[in-house]
Image (tube, rainbow, N blue to C red):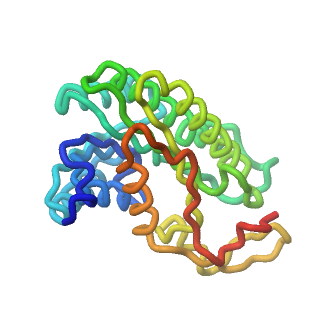
């Protein structure tokens, strides 16, 4: 592998939601780029299988640590494990998230709302907070944080209030993190993804609700394109930062959506 593709050699990276879908693709690409990987999620069996598969494919070191990122104590324990085992963290990818079915706003339960906020926003904040503490204290100081914003960080789909609200909030978290991190050599950027082909987006092929009330199929793109973009963002020196990047299926209905 070319030197540029091994930009993560000797570095430690954490990907939340790294056991499946886009998170797995990101983590695998980072592992191939030389990062020692920590992947986290709530399902131990899924994580451990993902770590084995990833390590076998990339030849890298992949550590699976189960964690509910909406729980402050469990997030603190996750980062203590990273500090104890690896001594530092160079890259955090806040990828984990969830959604509720596309139902009218007035039918969303408080439990559904609270679950999405915990998974998509609170979890990203808690991980960012712990990453700050570790990155400020380590030597050499600093690191990078990449947030998965989704195109819903700027443009909603119909019946998506909880998801859209949290993803808009991720943009605010990204900017605040980028600002507050300057003094400590901590860079933060956001990748907004449009229709990566995963199990979660498989319904795109059969049709999803559009702003005009129609149901229409939408194009998707391979996860590899997203993963390659994350590796590029991560490969930059800390003096440079991609604040926002949108990677989407070229012909998906984003421009003009709504």
Q: Which one is in front, 22 or 92?
A: 92
Quarter of the image holding residue 160? Answer: bottom right
Left or right position of 160 against 140 = right
Residue 102: image x %, image y %? 70, 59
Which residue is rendered at x = 37% and y = 28% of the image?
74
Left or right position of 140 against 61 = right
Quadrant of image for the N terminus: bottom left
State how many labels appear. Answer: 0
Q: Which one is in front, 32 or 157?
A: 32
Which residue is rendered at x = 39% and y = 63% of the image?
228
Q: Is residue 156 above or below residue 118?
A: below
Q: Which one is in front, 188 or 171?
A: 188
Q: Residue furthest front?
A: 239
Which residue is rendered at x = 33% and y = 42% of the image?
14
Quarter of the image holding residue 193? Answer: bottom right
Quadrant of image for the C terminus: bottom right
Residue 78: image x %, image y %? 31, 31
Residue 29: image x %, image y %? 31, 60
Would residue 87 be visible to someone looking at this image?
Answer: yes
Would residue 111 be visible to someone looking at this image?
Answer: no
Which residue is rendered at x = 60% and y = 40% of the image?
170
Residue 72: image x %, image y %? 44, 24
């Amino acid at each position: 592998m070319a030197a540029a593709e091994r930009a993560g050699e000797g570095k430690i990276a954490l990907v939340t939601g790294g056991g499946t879908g886009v998170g797995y693709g990101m983590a695998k690409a980072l592992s191939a780029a030389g990062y020692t990987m920590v992947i986290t999620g709530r399902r131990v069996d899924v994580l451990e299988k993902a770590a084995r598969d990833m390590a076998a494919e990339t030849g890298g070191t992949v550590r699976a640590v189960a964690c509910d990122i909406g729980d402050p104590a469990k997030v603190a324990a996750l980062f203590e494990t990273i500090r104890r085992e690896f001594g530092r963290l160079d890259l955090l990818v806040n990828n984990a998230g969830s959604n509720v079915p596309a139902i009218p706003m007035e039918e969303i339960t408080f439990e559904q709302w609270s679950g999405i906020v915990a998974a998509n926003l609170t979890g990203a904040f808690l991980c960012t907070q712990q990453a700050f503490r570790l990155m400020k204290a380590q030597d050499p100081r600093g690191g990078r944080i990449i947030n998965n914003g989704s195109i819903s960080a700027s443009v909603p789909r119909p019946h998506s209030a909880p998801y859209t609200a949290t993803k808009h909030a991720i943009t605010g978290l990204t900017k605040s993190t980028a600002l507050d991190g300057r003094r400590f050599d901590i860079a933060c950027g956001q990748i907004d993804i449009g229709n990566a082909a995963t199990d979660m987006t498989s319904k795109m092929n059969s049709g999803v609700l559009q702003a005009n009330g129609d149901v229409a199929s939408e194009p998707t793109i391979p996860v590899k394109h997203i993963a390659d973009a994350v590796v590029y963002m991560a490969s930059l020196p800390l003096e440079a930062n991609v604040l926002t990047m949108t990677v989407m299926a070229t012909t998906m209905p984003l421009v003009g959506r709504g």
